[in-house]
Image (tube, coloured by chain):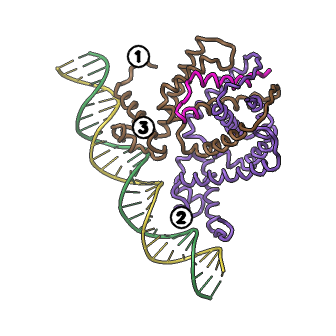
Chain colours: A purple, B brown, C yellow, D green
Amino acid sequence: MDKTTRTDPRILRTRQLLRDAFIELLEEMEIEKISVNRLAERATINRVTFYLHYKDIPDMLDKMADDMIDDIHRVLDQSTVKSDSPELINSTLLVNLLEHIAEHSKFYKVILASHRTTIFTDRLLRLLTKLISDGIEKRGNSSFVTKNNIQKDIAVWYSSAALIGTIVSWLRVDMPYTPMFLAKQFLMLRKLEDNTE
Amino acid sequence: MDKTTRTDPRILRTRQLLRDAFIELLEEMEIEKISVNRLAERATINRVTFYLHYKDIPDMLDKMADDMIDDIHRVLDQSTVKSDSPELINSTLLVNLLEHIAEHSKFYKVILASHRTTIFTDRLLRLLTKLISDGIEKRGNSSFVTKNNIQKDIAVWYSSAALIGTIVSWLRVDMPYTPMFLAKQFLMLRKLEDNTE
DNA sequence: TTCACTATACGACACGTTGTAAATTTAGTC
DNA sequence: GACTAAATTTACAACGTGTCGTATAGTGAA
């Protein structure tokens, strides 16, 4: 797609301005308050120009999400090529992912951890966090591993949500741990479930 | 608050109409498309009346989230009174929670699992789900438990996110498992981490 | 029943946002 | 330096927002 036709630098410039402006605005206000007006003004482009690139703001978000996924894929591909460990989520891969996120933390923080319309999930998360946190105080020990009866899909729901959630929380408190440390911690937690079959 | 002053039935009626209309609309369209106009029309009340109850739509969402949390608190309080097991999240409590959600699944599905502005989290979740899912296919066994070195806060991030995520996924595929079964599965996964100290 | 109270309905207003259309200017390409 | 495409400018109609008075009708108490 990109071999013969190099994209007009003006297009790249405009899109970059729009995306930067969007991140800026999202740091300052809730997403519903971001109008095409404001966005164009902040990006120092004409409002009409916005419509030459995106259908509307949700469309712009879609495109940005596509880009994000592409970026992450690139990071992951690099890691999987290099190491070929038997582990489910190998350490290199996870560390690379977390480092990538840390590098672009301004973006990820605002995008992944921005509130509103995540309110409900947020509120519920807060409640359960307290619940689990309280419980951790007063608990006993029991070591046990028989997850032969656990549905694969449930285990997948469980652990992917755990990963994302861990990352989001980490971002929200401004990354007090290094990617390496967090990855190790995560893998320790993760390993406990990684024994099916 | 509610002992002497009973609330005007008209107020209750209007709010109920608004909330029902909101859920209906959220089933039909993205949240950004829900205007006060549309909402009032669907609720068969006058648009101006909306502003007698809520500042704007985000404000209405806040209030609805408050109500949700209150409801859940009621469910949890009941469960914790009845049983006093040593487990971190006891089975009764979890089952009750899941049953409550299942009972009001129309509400919870639309509220917790509705897309847009969760796009990014969604997309990332999809990616990681595939990753973990692929990995589950070709993996070995290793049993191991030494999480003495795991930070409490990280463990809390991890497990609360896992719980919410499991619930959201369960809702999105229209609850193919009973609350009881899901709770058991979850507790099995959870128990593995519940061995600190 | 009557009556005061107050929630809701109605019509109207100023204002901002949206999406599109046209003509024009500006910048990149070869 | 001429051709091409992107960005600007101005304009417009449609819609959404938030806030007025004022009129209507449901509510709870005397």
Q: Secondary structure at mark 1?
A: loop
Q: Quadrant of the C terminus of chain A?
A: top right
Of the pair B32 and A186, the residue shown nearer to us: A186
* Residue A173 at least partly seen: no
Disc 2: which residue: A52
Q: Residue B141 in the image: state x and y as whole percent.
A: 79, 31
How much space separates mark 3 and mark 2, taking CA atoms? Answer: 34 Å
Three-letter code, disc 3: Glu
Residue at 81% x, 30% y is: B142
Camera-nearest label, 3 or 2? 3
In the image, which residues are magenta?
Answer: B168-197
Side of B122 where D12 appears, left or right: left
Camera-nearest label, 1 or 2? 2
Disc 1: which residue: B4
Of the pair B97 and B140, the residue shown nearer to us: B140
Kindly indicate the quadrant of the structure image that contains residue B183: top right
Q: Residue A68 in the image: state x and y as whole percent.
A: 66, 51
> Which secondary structure is most common in the magenta stretch?
helix
Kindly indicate the quadrant of the structure image that contains residue A12: bottom right
Residue at 60% x, 60% y is: A43
Q: Given the image, what chain letter belongs to the residue carrying mark 2? A: A
Numbered mark located on residue B24 in the image: 3
How much space separates mark 1 and mark 2, taking CA atoms? Answer: 60 Å
Q: Residues within 10 Å of mark 3 (few under 14, many from 20)?
A: some
Numbered mark located on residue B85 in the image: none
Side of B41 where D4 appears, left or right: right
In magenta segment, residue B35: no
Mark earlier in primary sequence (3, 1)? 1
* Residue B30 at least partly seen: yes
Q: Residue B92 in the image: state x and y as whole percent.
A: 60, 16
Three-letter code, disc 2: Leu
